[in-house]
Amino acid sequence: MFPIWLYARKWLLSWGRLRCSLVELIVLNIGLQAGVLDTRTFSMFVLHALVLTFIVSCCGYRRFPYD
């Protein structure tokens, strides 16, 4: 039997990072449109947000497997 708390922790970990990345991308877009960031810095931060979201999701699934 699969304990529900493991699924809840994995879901919250992934959802929390996804929300954080979404807010980060919104702030980055505002900064780019306002002229605070150049395209190179913007691209580095977007890549950072995407890579971290992917890593946290994968680590969550490895740390709290379904089996």
Image: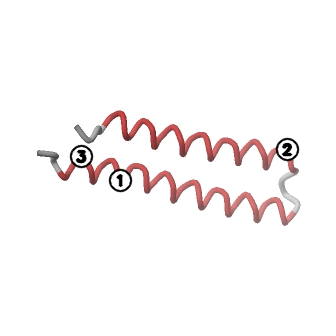
Q: Amino acid at mark 3?
A: Leu
> Which residue lies under the disc numbered 3?
6
Q: Residue at x 51, y 55 (%)?
A: 18
Q: Amino acid at mark 2?
A: Arg
**13 lies left or right of 27:** left
Q: Amino acid at mark 1?
A: Trp
**11 lies left or right of 56:** left
**31 lies left or right of 53:** right
SS assignment at label 3: helix
Q: Residue at x 11, y 45 (%)?
A: 1
Q: Which mark is residue 11?
A: 1
Q: Mark 3 and mark 2 in contact (Cβ < 8 Å)?
A: no
- Label 2 CA crowd tier, 10 Å (few <14, some 14–19, many 20+): few
Q: Which quadrant of the figure has residue 64?
A: top left
Q: Residue at x 38, y 40 (%)?
A: 60
Q: CA distance from mark 2 to mark 1?
A: 33 Å
SS assignment at label 1: helix
